[in-house]
Image: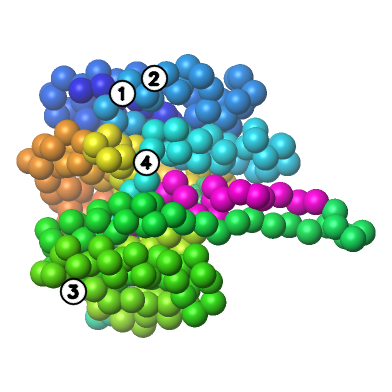
Amino acid sequence: MKICVLPGDGIGPEITAEAVRVLQALDLKFEMEEALLGGCAVDATGNPYPEATQKLARVADAVLLGAVGGPQYDTLPREQRPERGLLGIRKDLGLFANLRPAILYAELANASTLKPEVVSGLDILIIRELTGDIYFGQPRGIETREGERVGFNTMIYSESEIRRIGRVAFESARKRSKKVCSVDKMNVLECTQLWRDVIIEVAKDYPDVELSHMLVDNAAMQLVRNPKQFDVMVTGNMFGDILSDEASMLTGSIGMLPSASLDEKNKGLYEPCHGSAPDIAGKGVANPLATILSAAMMLRYTFANEAAATRIENAVKKVLAQGFRTGDIYEAGTKKVGTKEMGDAVLAAL
Ligand code: IPM
Ligand code: MG
């Protein structure tokens, strides 16, 4: 079981270190090797997804990623930006299915900005297509036309791309409460009209799963109005990016949201949904739980070790019940801890 570890930038190294300690504590004989991705890779090699990292990531069974990016890289040419490294590895490894579960832990009901009764018991799975859409569509660019600059991107999906992410959604729903809500903008965008048509075709193979459709603007509103109406939500790359950040706040903090990005054979890249948080980098205060929970997803999806995955998730529940909180989820009456102490607490709970 080979794991490629990519700590990345900002708080990435701090949170990844805690997830690595948790994986090591399981005594499952992982082989772990570190490499560079993102800004740190640009600094060292000029390339945000260097060849050495590509090699390692391609042979590994799974990749554990911290986060990439930082303000010092925002003015670099686009192909040298850390985000390009992240998109590059997703595309290179064919990780088209991004699973982002938003689960509210009972202890954190007050950490959400929404009323506890709106979010208590929340358990949503957002399935975001990750290697297509406007993120990768050609043509794209900024150029001068008729004396002024224009910026343009292409929103594009092929039916095979829609079909395979649709199948992931229906298969996932079968293991849950058998409801899929597909999110599009078919009232305006042809690309997502095709999305809706193909999802309806895929649904015919899953008569036991209830399919509904929602326009993305309404979905954004419904997520804060009545999020518990959703179970599995499936959508394209850009809408999924936005809706998953929104869903994260239902759970109290984006610091709690793990993710899995899978190829057709369950090789996966596992990363927290949050970014590199440059403002708190190096201070030892970041919440490592999203990364630790991403490691649990790795055990579940790539290594098919449900028992070990549940063990980590239960340990996280236990530390929350014990009152340990990093700054992002802190409230009066709980114990404020740093990144490493949170990792220690999870290890003790394991
Ligand atoms: C995410 C992030 C990335 C994305 C950025 C960092 C490129 O926001 O994983 O959601 O947009 O996919
Ligand atoms: Mg995002």
Q: CA distance from mark 4 to mark 1?
A: 14 Å
Q: Earlier in the sequence, mark 2 or mark 4?
A: 2
**Foreground label between 3 and 1:** 3
Q: Residues within 10 Å of mark 2 (few under 14, many from 20)?
A: some
Q: Residue at x 17, y 53 (%)?
A: 317
Color encoding of the figure:
rainbow
Label 4: which residue? 95
Q: Earlier in the sequence, mark 4 or mark 1?
A: 1
Could you say where residue 331 lies in the image, as x and y percent from the top left?
34, 63
Marks 2/4 in contact by CB < 8 Å: the verdict is no
> Hey, what amino acid is under mark 1?
Ala
Q: CA distance from mark 3 to mark 1?
A: 37 Å
Q: Residue at x 73, y 57 (%)?
A: 151
Dot label at residue 56: 2
Whether residue 328 is visible here, answered yes or no, is no
Label 3: which residue? 210
Residue 41 in which image quadrant: top right
Q: Which residues are magenta?
A: 127-143
Q: Earlier in the sequence, mark 3 or mark 1?
A: 1
**Foreground label between 4 and 1:** 4
Q: CA distance from mark 3 to mark 2?
A: 41 Å
Could you say where residue 53 lies in the image, as x and y percent from the top left?
46, 22
Q: Is residue 71 magenta?
A: no
Above or below for 115 versus 347 = below
